[in-house]
Image: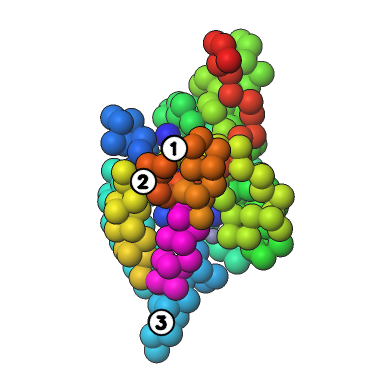
Amino acid sequence: MLVVGAHSADFVWRAAGAIAKHTEAGGEARVVSLSYGERGESGELWKIPGQTEQNVKKHRHAEATEAAAAVGASFESLDLGDYPLNVDQAGVDRLAEFMRDYAPDVVLTHADKDPFNPDHPVAYAVVAKARLLTAGAVVEAGFRTAPPSEFLVFEPHQPDLCGFVPSVFVDITSVFEKKKQAMSAMKAQSYLQQYYAERAEHRGNHARKVTGNKEIRQAEAFQRIVPNVVTGL
Ligand SMILES: [Zn+2]
């Protein structure tokens, strides 16, 4: 599994449960953040007098590494800068090369729209392009390729304003404590912990309604960008 966020904490709120389920089942998960969210998403750290961007990045790296470890994943950042996140072709190529080497089965990233965030849609565009450059047209190509992955976007902060319509709920009940542990590592955005714990409860309610399974307490929502292929219905 490859999870790409615009900022270093994005994966925690939106996909930590799905990551934990994946790694608990024996899968491998790597988190790549395009930036540290050092300028735009590190609120608490900027309250410290004399704070610097370098120091914020250092904190954010440590926090994200701890959060990723809590759900069995590794963390790395391309450190391309945030607010605004600008990714040139060299940046896209860097991510595509990473994808060819890693050849993930499933890729998660942001939705393509977000009226409240300048960087999340950029991340979507970069990941979508890198993924296409990784798989090519699924024919013999004049460049190195890797098989096409599943491709889903995770739930934005205000899903209805981002055109997000969930098509998959992941039951994260059994790993919810791990998600909470990952969230508590993100001290620069501690105000989001309660918000995303509540979101997981709400999505758990929706997942119960869909399935009738009363055991589901918490869930995460995703939207498929490419269809899932099954051998029968
Ligand atoms: Zn973000």
- Quadrant in which ligand 1 is drawn: bottom right
The residue tagged 1 is 213
Q: CA distance from mark 2 to mark 1?
A: 12 Å
Left or right, 5 with reference to 179: right
The residue tagged 3 is 51
Q: Splitting the image into 4 quarters, where does residue 181 fall?
A: bottom left
For label 2, the SS is: helix
Q: Could you tell me what secondary structure mostly forms the magenta stretch?
A: helix
Q: Provide the residue span drawn in magenta.
A: 188-201
Q: CA distance from mark 3 to mark 1?
A: 48 Å
Residue 8 magenta: no
Task: State the image coordinates of residue 16 (x, y, percent, origin top left).
Answer: 40, 49
Q: Answer with mark 3 or mark 1, whichever residue precedes in sequence.
A: 3
Task: State the image coordinates of residue 35 (x, y, percent, origin top left).
Answer: 50, 57
Q: Answer with mark 2 or mark 1, whichever residue precedes in sequence.
A: 2
The amino acid beneath tag 3 is: Gln
Of 128 and 92, which appears nearest the observer? 128
Q: Write the residue at 40% across / 49% down.
A: 217
The amino acid beneath tag 2 is: Thr
Which mark's residue is nearer the viewer, 2 or 1?
Answer: 1
The residue tagged 2 is 173
Which mark's residue is nearer the viewer, 3 or 1?
Answer: 1
Q: Tag 3: Cα neighbours inside 10 Å, few (<14), some, or many (≥20)?
A: few
